[in-house]
Each structure stands twice: as structure tokens, then as C-alpha cells.
Amino acid sequence: MAVIHHTVLKPTKLELLTSWLPSRPWYRGGADARPELAKAGGFRLDDPEGAVGIEFLVVTDAAGPGSYLVPLAYRGAPLDGAEHALVGTMEHGVLGRRWAYDGMRDPVLVAQLLALIEGRVEAQDQSVSDTPDRDVTRSCAGGPLAFTGHLATDDEEGTVLASPSGPALRLHRVLRPAEDAVPAGAIGHVAGSWTAPDGTRARGLFATLRP
């Protein structure tokens, strides 16, 4: 399993996202906004090859306000053909330079998210090595899942992965408190908790899978 290094990042993840979020169509603060971000939750997944760091980060924006789910893939070298998905680069105190990508455009993160929905892997604690995150729940009524040749598109609510002849996966970027239940018509889901802008604990959907 991935080892969590407690070290210094320059710039920090929140600093990278401060400049990146306003360029996203699902960000509610507008293109000219200056987000005021705080970490509010999230979880990690393991890359079986141990090369890519996978984090689903929840942030709140006091300037918005709002809560957002941002999956990030951390790599030790640039990902070919993914310049459009680069969030930024960071200097890691242990691992050196890291390239942070929008995870919904990274094939390793997408594959592990599908594995989580199917129940083949467990969500991991965001801050502690080798520790499952029991707060993250999932379900799947179909499978096996594959998105070969998938196309990721953003809208005002999040990101949709659609394959030519398979299901559609929606990542809910704009988080809203809701019951932890599979929505009508969905064949799978991921749900979890985060700290809302007012300081209360909220729970809702992170991703839904539809036929």
C-alpha cells in the first residue's frame, strides 16, 4: 500500500487549486474569483504499481461558498498527452518534483475508481498509511467495468466519463449533503463525508454510475 509522507510541499495542494479552480465550469465562484480554500475531507486509493499517488480531496471555499471534490493524480514525470489536465507541479520534500493532474483524465486513477465501485479495492485513509477509510461506502449492480477509449467532459455539476458502449460515470464535483443511498436509476455509487463550510459534518454522493 502507498506510504503517506508527512513533509513539505511547495506550492501546497491548496495553493495549486486556488489558481486552477476558477478555470473549471463547475466552480461556482466564477472565472475571476480568488478562492479561499480549506481542506475538508477526502480519501486515497492505491496504485497497484506504486507509481501514481491517488487522492480524492474535498475542499471548501469561503469565497464561494461551496464544497468541491477534486481527484488528483500525482506522478514523478509528465503524463504523455495530458498537458490539458495538468493542475500544476510541486516540490515534494521526499519524492522531489511531482506533476499533479486532474484525476478524471488520468487512466490509473480512473481504473482504481472503477475498482473501488466494484468492491475490488478499499478506500484508504487520507493521512495514515495502510489504513482503510471505513467512512467511504460504495455499491455496484453490474461489472466488470471498463472505460477504454472513454471521454471525460465537464459540466456545471462535475465530470462525466462515457464509453461508446458502456455505462456513464459521473463524479460529483459540487458536493451536496444527501442520503447515503443509490439514486434512482443508478447501478453503482461512491459516498463519503466532509466538513461543510459552516463547520458541520455532511455526507453525500461522490460518484454515481448509470447504464
Image (spheres, rainbow, N blue to C red):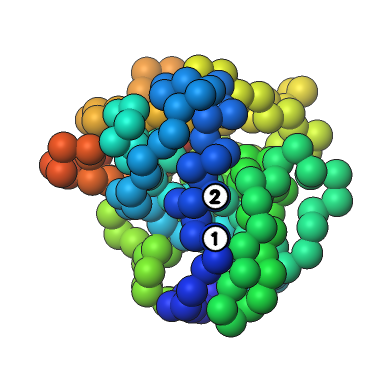
Q: Circle 2 sits in a helix, a strand or a loop, which is it?
A: helix
Above or below for 14 versus 185? below
Tell me if 30 is positioned left or right of 179 in this view.
right
Query: Disc 2 marks which residue?
Result: 16
Q: CA distance from mark 2 to mark 1?
A: 7 Å
Q: Circle 1 sits in a helix, a strand or a loop, which is it?
A: loop
- Name the residue type under label 2: Leu
From where the camera sits, is residue 120 visible? no
The part of the image, by quadrant, that contains residue 11 is bottom right
Can you say which quadrant of the picture contains the C terminus?
top right
At 28% from the left and 54% from the top, the residue drawn is 135
Q: Residues at badges 2 and 1 in contact (C-beta under 8 Å)?
A: yes
At 78% from the left and 64% from the top, the residue drawn is 77
- Percent from the top left, x then y, of residue 110? 63, 46
Query: Disc 1 marks which residue?
Result: 11
At 69% from the left and 69% from the top, the residue drawn is 97
Which is more toward the observer, 72 or 119?
72
- Percent from the top left, x then y, of residue 208? 46, 30
